Image (cartoon, helix red, strand yellow):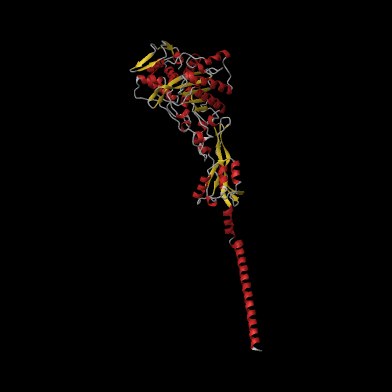
Amino acid sequence: MSSQESARTLSQKVAAGLKAWRYGSVLGVFLLVVLALGWRLVDLHVVDNDFLRKQGDVRTIRVEAIDAHRGVITDRYGEPLAVSTPVQTIWANPSETDPNEPRLANLARVLEISEAKLRQRLATYSSREFIYLRRKVQPGLATRAMELDIPGVYVRQEYRRYYPAGEVTAHVVGFTNIDERGQEGMELAYNEWLSGESGRKRVLKDNRGRIIKDLTLIRDAAPGHNLELSIDLRLQYLAYRELKSVVNAHDARGGTLVMLDVDTGEVLAMVNQGSYNPNDRAQLAPENLRNKAITDLFEPGSTMKPITMAAALESGQYSAKTTIDTSPGYRRFGRFTIRDHRNYGVMSLTDIIVKSSNVGISKIATELGGDTIRNLYARLGLGQPTGIGFPGEAVGVLPAPPKWRPVEEATLSYGYGMSVNALQLAQAYMVIANGGIRYPLSLMKLDARPEGHRVLSEGVAADVRAMLGEAVSRGTGRRAQPGFYSAGGKTGTVHLVGAQGYEDSQYKAIFAGMAPIDNPRIVTVVAVDAPQSGEYYGGEVAAPVFSRVMSDALRLLNVKPELEVGSAGLQNETSGERG
């Protein structure tokens, strides 16, 4: 074999060897890849199966809160006064949302927010995973927002508080903040009772964060407890209507009306002017948030004269037939003078109430002494908490000096030098109305009559009721006559107190009374602040409100009318003594 053939043979052998090596190498690499993939499959499906399943679950399964709706507040007949309705909250995960996303302009229009501020918030909080975009909106608006399909924008269900009676029950019911925490009224006083406890559930979500399926209930939500108030919404509406009407008619600064059930102490109606609509917070004025019937104090004036008279009768020094000489129509205490409208001369105890004689009642007070009068005031609940549990209740002032000056005894007898709220005044008249029993007051509906205690004899209470009936039939309270029902009550007109003391031209017109007079069912107190129409006496401003409210209320409560058509016409008359 020649050298050339030998070289060719060697070259062929080398080439064949390289080809076999390359083939073997490729085959080896292929086998290694197959083995690696096989091992990885075994590792994923056998060795690391539990770990990987958990990692997948972390990315698709979430634990979601289940919001608990707040308890319903109703009136005594089940009419809703505060309810929680399901709404949607739109939120974003800034780490998933590009602030330059073009569709954010459409989202801003849907949510009625500033596009620039929306983009700025997303950029500012880009490291966060949660920010609110718009809370507690109607489901339709949330649907429109989600249809834009913007990454990182989500919705969740929450609840929003709604008040069907609006401003009519605002001061009693109160309202909550956006997180459904009580801020005023019964919403605040019973916040823990009304609040529910949120639940938790495990859910499956898609890559947009939308819930696909509920998987496991971890803890069910516990709704808040319901609250049944003593308020009768029918009486509340008519009381609010009449009070608002008189405040507007007399261009008054404000007003208050309280109505109590005589036999239980339940509050049937409690309204104030001005008021506010808890469903629309945009126009809230801080001065309108107070429940003035409980938080505001005033001197009760002549409405205290019947209680001073009760102290006189209880003392045994006076009887219904006792007379008092009020001549010459005034009394002087140093530089201070007490006056009547005119010189009434010798008066019976009844006529002192009927004509609202300051001189007559002050002479009785001088004989009784300040402690005797004050003690009865205190037994009736004046100068102390009512125990109603309402936030911000004002206790009032009931003086107790070590030694009474004659002028202090005199002014105390007709309601000056002391202060009460409207609810306390109504409670005092309730005791007279029901025969001398003081019941605890309640804004909650009661299933049975509560346990009360006697603070005044039945005979004394009956005598004072008869005097109050005369005051309405022929005295300062004639305009309080409630249509075809009998009534009793007392007017009061007091100077308002300002920064510099008593305001000479500003008055509070008051009427406190009960009906029907022979077997009272309801006690009502009406107070109107600073009427500007020229009329300002309690008999002119407050008494007519009492008349209209009580007439309608007694009909609604199915109380049988007592008076004939002719006698009912007295309600539009007035006497010379205005009270």
* Residue 133 vs residue 370, the one in the foreground: 133
Question: In the image, residue 295 lies at what x, y percent?
Answer: 45, 30
Q: Is residue 230 visible?
A: no
Q: Residue drawn at (39%, 20%), measured in percent from left and top?
A: 411
Question: In the image, residue 208 lies at what x, y percent?
Answer: 59, 50
Which residue is the extreme one toward the bottom?
A: 1
In the rendered view, would you say 13 is above or below 224? below
Which residue is the extreme one toward the left?
A: 334
Question: Based on the displayed image, in which of its 4 quarters is residue 157 positioned?
Answer: top right
Question: In the image, residue 325 lies at what x, y percent?
Answer: 40, 11
Q: Is residue 237 visible?
A: yes
Q: Quadrant of the C terminus?
A: top left
Q: Quadrant of the N terminus?
A: bottom right
* Residue 229 vs residue 378, the one in the foreground: 229
* Residue 57 vs residue 351, the one in the foreground: 57
In the rendered view, would you say 377 is above or below 53? above
In the rendered view, would you say 145 is above or below 537? below
In the rendered view, would you say 578 is above or below 217? above
Question: Based on the displayed image, in which of its 4 quarters is residue 327 positioned?
Answer: top left
Disc tally is: 0
Which residue is the extreme one toward the top?
A: 345
Question: In the image, residue 328 lies at what x, y percent?
Answer: 38, 11
Q: Is residue 557 left or right of residue 507?
A: right
